[in-house]
Image: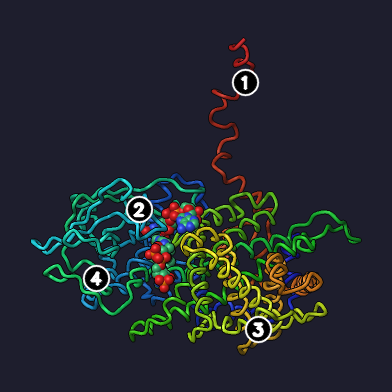
């Protein structure tokens, strides 16, 4: 049988230790053990089946999600799962749900923006799920522009309360996940008003629904905002709409770590920067970067396995056609995505470390690394989610016609993933934040304030503005120092050019708007440099296992040279490399594809995904694609009857020409 033999033979060709690569991918032996155990637990539990998801009506789909969430929570309690294990369980259940917002945003917001007393009061309730919360920031009229939010929270000194109100239609909260049908509470972002004075946006804990009968509390209008893109996909989530009509909450439900309102109605600022009000977004953006590597690797796993099973044209002497993975065009589309999945994995690992480090510093009142953390999380969230969304679609095309079937798993993966380019900050808006950070860094060069963190390279501005790439032969592109210098010089020169163009404007804000398309490109260049440099740093660590390091080096080089090839215009126009060096990079890339080819299946096996998680007929571990595709087709409800409903009303009259006769 084609698929079985093909994948078994591919696996036997692997030139590295797959089990050790699994450890590298997971992050540690411990993480691999946890993720392996929990993924199997989920795969073997019939409640977590997801094969009918794309065929259910919205109501049935949503109820099924509630059933799964309740079952997940039951299993977490019964099995006494740790926080880490519970998070893995949520991941492998693989269905967006209110739980994500409760654990992923509501709780972190209280932890990050609440005082000690507020945490003591609310966190135990939230941890035990005696209350369920969501994150209600975005409104109908404003999402990106957080300072433009219109919801008001007016302090009433008579009663020691805030009055939460939605003064306009556009102030309706719109989009928060978990809000529409489930959450009992929300962190609501609104304008703090004291004595008619507007003190800007702050977070408030507001109860929305009764804990007895789940009905909305007085003054609250609440519902779901309707069907979203694709079938199944993000429609398991109750993204909601919410309006307040002068709803009163006690004063101590304003989150008061950043600023406090006293009983007398005085606003007291603490020593923490006001930007901490945006802190949850930094936390989630960091998580989204790790998730990008999961979504991309999943699509790549499906497309790679299928490409080894699928054969088209080119009869060989033994009468067998060519595996499509052997076509160079297929490799040049697929292998950069494989390399990107690994690259995003490692940059995600690093970003997690950076976030933890910033958090520890914040606890010790050291706020110096916050701007860098904001720029890195914003930029990498943008870079990785855009590349992943495009990458999933490319994987669909790599699977030809069968990729368009829901049973390939790719349409739903695409539909569920693409909002990541928008939520937690529109990707362009976030890159503009990075650009601001870069321009600020460039403007401070020579002022005595040394660039730090990921902008350290900018301290070598003179060298990077003048250096010439030393590549003379294709293999020179394999040297990490050569790659790094080219990426640093490109980023440096694009940032400096943007800063110089900006300086020509009298009004900097106007200049920023005018040059924003170029600024976004400079931000992308900086973020790609971060990804490349973190991959190279990873390779400097001790990497055990036969052949593992060699494979990772090849993937790192593929990622870097693919980006170089894709953005050749930048590298050439800034004079970082010559056209001859560009063509040598291309030659090297081709040779790297040949190096990865025999290892491709093993490299995707190293993700250690179960068939349940992949939910793809094309990506099955055993490669038994055709019989299963055939079998799946017959499961479609349309095939329940041989003659379809509607035959007599709509098909028969055409065939019998009754419709035409009636018209004549
Ligand atoms: C069974 C259970 C098991 C357990 C389960 C575990 C679950 C874990 C799951 C985790 C996954 C989570 C699920 C994710 C689902 C996603 C759902 C989506 C949610 C959302 O979308 S929430 C809404 C998000 N909204 C946005 O992102 C809005 C984007 N806009 C902004 O961020 C800002 O408004 C802005 C940055 C674009 C502009 O703001 P503003 O005008 O105020 O600022 P300036 O540009 O003027 O900047 C002022 C200075 O502040 C700095 N700055 C800005 N932002 C930040 C920040 N976040 N942090 C730090 N600093 C920041 C700027 O750099 C400026 O600094 P400067 O020095 O003055 O230049
Ligand atoms: C599936 C999903 C789940 C969500 N979950 C939540 C949630 O749980 N809680 C919550 O509060 N919110 C949530 N959101 C809302 C989300 O955070 C916002 O949609 C997002 O921040 C983008 O804001 P916006 O919709 O206002 O886009 P807009 O800002 O209106 O963007 C429209 C266009 O304008 C461009 N644009 C905007 N500003 C600028 C600028 N300054 N310069 C250049 N171009 C610009 C953008 O690039 C984009 O092309 C969710 C959204 C989705 C899709």
| Among numbered discs 4 and 1, the one appearing first in the sequence | 4
Which of disc 1 and disc 2 is earlier in sequence? 2
Q: First in sequence, mark 3 or 1: give its number.
A: 3
The answer to whether one can see residue 67 in this image is: no
Q: Is residue 204 left or right of residue 340?
A: left
Q: Quadrant of residue 304?
A: bottom right
The quarter holding residue 137 reads bottom left
Q: Is residue 660 above or below residue 601?
A: above
Q: Give the mark, 2 or 4, whose residue is nearer the N terminus.
A: 4
Q: What residue is shown with label 1?
A: 654
Where residue 588 sits in the image (x, y, percent)?
Answer: 79, 74
Measuring from the top left, give residue 379's x and y in whole percent.
52, 69
Q: Are marks 2 and 4 in contact (CB under 8 Å)?
A: no
The secondary element bearing badge 1 is classed as helix
Foreground disc of the pair 4, 3: 3
- In terms of secondary structure, where does tag 3 sit? helix
Disc 2 from disc 4: Cα separation: 25 Å
Report if the CB atoms under discs 4 and 3 are less than 8 Å apart: no
Instruction: Residue at 31%, 50% (x, y): give it.
Output: 172
**Count of picture labels:** 4
Q: Position of residue 130 (x, y in %)?
A: 25, 65
* Crowding at mark 4 (Cα within 10 Å: few <14, some 14-19, many 20+): some
Label 1 packing within 10 angstroms: few (<14), some (14-19), many (20+): some
Q: Which residue is mark 2?
A: 139
Residue that label 4 marks:
122
Q: SS class of the residue under badge 4?
A: helix
Distance of label 3 from label 1 (alpha carbons): 77 Å
The reply to whether the residue tagged 1 has its Cβ within 8 angstroms of ligand 2 is no
**Which label was assigned to residue 463?**
3
Residue 347 seen anywhere in this rendered image of the structure: yes
Compared across the picture, whether 23 is left or right of 212 comes to: right
The residue at the far right in this view is: 317
């Amino acid at each position: 049988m084609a698929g079985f033999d093909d994948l078994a033979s591919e696996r036997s060709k692997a030139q590295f230790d797959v089990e050790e690569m699994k450890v590298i991918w997971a992050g540690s032996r411990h993480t691999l053990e946890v993720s392996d155990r929990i993924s199997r637990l989920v795969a073997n539990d019939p409640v977590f089946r997801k094969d009918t998801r794309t065929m259910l009506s919205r109501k049935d789909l949503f109820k099924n999600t509630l059933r799964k969430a309740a079952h997940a929570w039951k299993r977490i309690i019964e099995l006494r799962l740790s926080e880490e294990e519970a998070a893995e369980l949520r991941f492998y259940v693989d269905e967006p749900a209110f739980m994500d917002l409760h654990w992923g945003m509501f709780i972190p917001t209280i932890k990050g923006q609440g005082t000690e007393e507020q945490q003591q009061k609310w966190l135990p309730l939230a941890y035990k799920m005696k209350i369920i919360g969501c994150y209600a920031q975005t409104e109908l009229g404003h999402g990106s522009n957080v300072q433009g939010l219109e919801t008001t929270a007016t302090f009433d000194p008579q009663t020691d309360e805030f009055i939460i109100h939605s003064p306009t239609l556009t102030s309706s909260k719109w989009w928060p996940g978990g809000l529409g049908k489930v959450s009992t509470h929300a962190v609501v972002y609104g304008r703090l008003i004291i004595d008619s004075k507007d003190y800007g946006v702050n977070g408030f804990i507001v109860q929305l629904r009764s804990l007895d009968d789940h009905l909305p509390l007085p003054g609250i209008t609440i519902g779901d905002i309707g069907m979203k893109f694709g079938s199944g996909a993000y429609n398991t989530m109750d993204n909601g709409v919410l309006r307040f009509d002068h709803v009163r909450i006690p004063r101590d439900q304003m989150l008061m770590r950043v600023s406090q309102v006293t009983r007398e109605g005085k606003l007291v600022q603490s020593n923490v920067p006001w930007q901490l009000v945006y802190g949850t977004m930094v936390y989630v953006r960091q998580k989204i970067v790790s998730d990008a590597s999961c979504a991309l690797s999943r699509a790549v796993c499906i497309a790679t396995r299928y490409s080894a099973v699928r054969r088209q044209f080119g009869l060989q002497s033994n009468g067998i056609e060519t595996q499509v993975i052997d076509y160079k065009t297929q490799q040049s589309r697929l292998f950069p995505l494989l390399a990107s999945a690994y690259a995003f994995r490692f940059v995600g690992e690093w970003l997690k470390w950076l976030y933890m480090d910033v958090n520890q510093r914040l606890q010790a009142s050291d706020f110096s690394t916050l701007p860098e953390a904001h720029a890195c999380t914003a930029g990498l969230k943008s870079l990785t989610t855009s590349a992943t969304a495009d990458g999933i679609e490319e994987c669909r095309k790599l699977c030809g016609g069968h990729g368009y079937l829901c049973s390939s798993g790719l349409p739903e993966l695409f539909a569920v993933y693409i909002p990541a380019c928008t939520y937690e900050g529109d990707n362009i808006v976030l890159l503009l934040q990075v650009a601001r950070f870069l321009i600020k860094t460039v403007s401070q060069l020579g002022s005595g304030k040394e660039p730090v963190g990921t902008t350290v390279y900018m301290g070598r501005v003179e060298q990077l503005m003048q250096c010439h790439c030393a590549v003379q032969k294709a293999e020179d592109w394999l040297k990490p120092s050569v790659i790094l210098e080219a990426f640093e010089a490109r980023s440096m020169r694009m940032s400096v050019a943007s800063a110089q163009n900006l300086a020509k404007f009298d009004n900097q804000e106007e200049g920023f708007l005018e040059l924003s398309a170029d600024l976004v490109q400079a931000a992308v260049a900086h973020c790609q440099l971060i990804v490349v440099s973190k991959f190279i740093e990873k390779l400097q660590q001790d990497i055990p296992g036969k052949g593992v390091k060699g494979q990772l080096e090849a993937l790192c080089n593929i990622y870097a040279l693919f980006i170089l090839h894709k953005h050749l215009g930048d590298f050439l126009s800034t004079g970082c490399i010559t056209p001859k060096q560009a063509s040598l990079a291309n030659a090297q890339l081709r040779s790297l594809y040949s190096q990865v080819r025999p290892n491709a299946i093993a490299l995707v096996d190293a993700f250690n995904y179960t068939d349940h998680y992949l939910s793809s007929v094309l990506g099955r571990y055993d490669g038994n694609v055709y019989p299963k595709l055939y079998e799946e087709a017959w499961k479609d409800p349309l095939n329940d009857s041989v003659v379809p409903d509607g035959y007599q009303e709509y098909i028969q009259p055409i065939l019998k020409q009754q419709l035409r006769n009636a018209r004549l």
